[in-house]
Amino acid sequence: MGSALDVQTGTRRVNLRSWRGSRRAATLVMVWTLLVALLGGSVQVAGAATPTLSVSPTVGRPDTRVVATGAGFPRSTAIVLTWDGSTSGMPAVRTRLDGSFRVRLAIPADASPGGHTLEASAGGVQATTTVTVTSAAVPGATATSVPPAPTATVTQGPAPTHTPTAVLTPADSSYGGRLLALVNDARSREGLGPLSTSGALNRAAQSYAETMRDSNCFSHTCPPEPDLARRAEAAGYRPWRGLGENIAYGYQTADDVFNAWMSSPGHRANILNGTFRDMGIGMAPGGANGPYWVQEFGTQ
């Protein structure tokens, strides 16, 4: 009885036919593989597994996370992930020794409803899968919140390096007063108590709105500002038991940005959070993408 094992090195092919003594044949293959690796060649065994790619869940909203899992790729190799042909926002990952990988990635915030192609490639092989986006994101808006805690656990951080040019409060700005009125009207319809203006949250909001505008950054963690909790504390809002933040850009009026936030489940949840008692507003006009808005919430 005989069998054949194909070993490739570049464009060369060597056909190693088995003979009596399986140990001798296995040893020869191992030595050959080692020599090829040392000489910079590549070794491929005929019949290698076809690479596969899957995601879980397969359906999601923009800016939500899915887990991509791949198998059958070259081992210990960098994987290139693309979303509809673009690597923008895709994470870096390498395969394990068995040629598999697992990585979390975010569905792009601007992804339109429908099917989108996720591809993984490495070493000349690739695999694709489809991710279905169920609804479009609210343009230029995102939300975050820090769950209430019995006591504040955030260590006091350094003051923000950015100094706001002006702190506009509902008392002296038309947009601030209008947003406060819109928020409290919406809360009243849900049977919730009104929010009060916080000078500290106003300072934090205005400083961060200007940071986003000046750095052309749209995120809850634009450098050099610290995160939401440390920004609030540095502005004087402490101790706190709960914090939340809505941000947006491109909306010209308080009514426009309020309607956008209320159309998004995450932003609406912050506005109608029954545990919040205070609110701060910041708006920085003149950005390349229009005004930048920040809405801070808190409970002390």
Image (tube, rainbow, N blue to C red):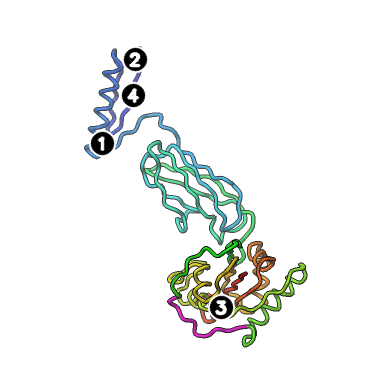
Relative to 164, is 35 above or below? above
Query: What amino acid is found at the position of numbered circle 1 in the picture?
Result: Ala
Q: In the rendered structure, which disc, 4 or 3, sits on the residue that comes first in sequence?
A: 4
Cα distance, mark 1 to mark 4? 18 Å
Q: Is residue 161 magenta?
A: yes
Relative to 65, is 175 above or below? below
Q: Residue 274 location in percent, x, y?
A: 69, 66
Secondary element under disc 1, as helix, strand or loop, is: helix
Q: Which mark is residue 5?
A: 4
Q: In this view, does 255 lie to the left or right of 50?
A: right
Q: Name the residue under label 3.
A: 200
Camera-near label (2 vs 1) is 1
Q: Residue 290 location in percent, x, y?
A: 55, 77
* Residue placed most toward the observer, 124 or 77: 77
Mark 4–mark 2 CB contact (< 8 Å): no
Cα distance, mark 2 to mark 1? 27 Å
Mark 4–mark 3 CB contact (< 8 Å): no
Secondary element under disc 4, as helix, strand or loop, is: strand
Residue located farthest toward the bottom when viewing the structure as drawn: 172
* Residue placed most toward the observer, 220 or 62: 220
Secondary element under disc 2, as helix, strand or loop, is: loop
Query: What amino acid is found at the position of numbered circle 3 in the picture?
Result: Ala
Camera-near label (2 vs 3) is 3
Q: Name the residue under label 1.
A: 37
